[in-house]
């Protein structure tokens, strides 16, 4: 009896909620090929309206990155995002030194272009995603696409 009840609950969770497609499914068919490829740190997931979700990834030295956030087909609402990193700042007051982490925003919803940057060192990047104006009873699918390519070496 206990096994049957557990199986029924599990089936309800699996079939009752729509799963979001993997991040690769959010890639639009590109007419022109470029050197960027989808990174394995890309994610997709279900997001409730008016709630905030955060993910992070590691940007490695020697790679160019392109970050894009995408609202899935059939999802309703406005996708808001903020891409940032935490930077340690050193402050000196007299003889006392203090260190404080501050948020350095790299891009936000106001920018329509994908964020492209090159990393000169390994660093942790955070992406905060939320949806406004959507149906509170229905989850929306969001994809965070991280694309990479090798940086071109310059100099001698």
Image (spheres, rainbow, N blue to C red):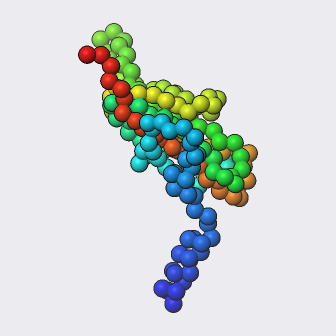
Residue drawn where x is 58% and y is 40% of the image:
31
Residue drawn where x is 73% and y is 53% of the image:
135
Q: Answer left or right for 39 relative to 75.
A: left
* Residue 27 x/y as whole percent: 55, 47
* Residue 148 x/y as whole percent: 42, 38
Quadrant in which residue 150 is drawn: top left
Pick whichever, 67 or 10, lies toward us: 67
Furthest-left residue in this view? 156
Residue 56, compared with residue 123, is above or below; it is below
Residue 101 in sight: no
Pick whichever, 100 or 131, lies toward us: 131
Residue drawn where x is 36% and y is 19% of the image:
90
Residue 83, compared with residue 99, is above or below; it is below
Question: Which quarter of the rendering shows the C terminus?
Answer: top left
Residue 53, compared with residue 11, is above or below; it is above
Residue drawn where x is 56% and y is 33% of the image:
114
């Amino acid at each position: 009896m206990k096994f049957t009840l557990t199986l029924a609950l599990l089936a309800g969770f699996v079939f009752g909620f729509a799963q979001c497609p993997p991040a690769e499914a959010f890639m639009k068919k590109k007419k022109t090929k470029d050197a960027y490829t989808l990174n394995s740190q890309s994610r997709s997931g279900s997001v409730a309206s008016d709630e905030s979700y955060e993910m992070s990834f590691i940007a490695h030295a020697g790679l160019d990155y392109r970050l894009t956030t995408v609202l899935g087909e059939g999802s309703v609402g406005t996708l808001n995002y903020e891409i940032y990193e935490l930077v340690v700042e050193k402050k000196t007051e007299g003889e006392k030194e203090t260190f404080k982490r501050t948020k350095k925003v790299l891009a936000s919803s106001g920018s329509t272009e994908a964020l492209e940057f090159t990393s000169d060192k390994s660093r942790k990047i955070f992406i905060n995603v939320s949806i406004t104006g959507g149906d509170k009873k229905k989850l929306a699918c969001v994809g965070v696409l991280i694309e990479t390519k090798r940086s071109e070496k310059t100099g001698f």
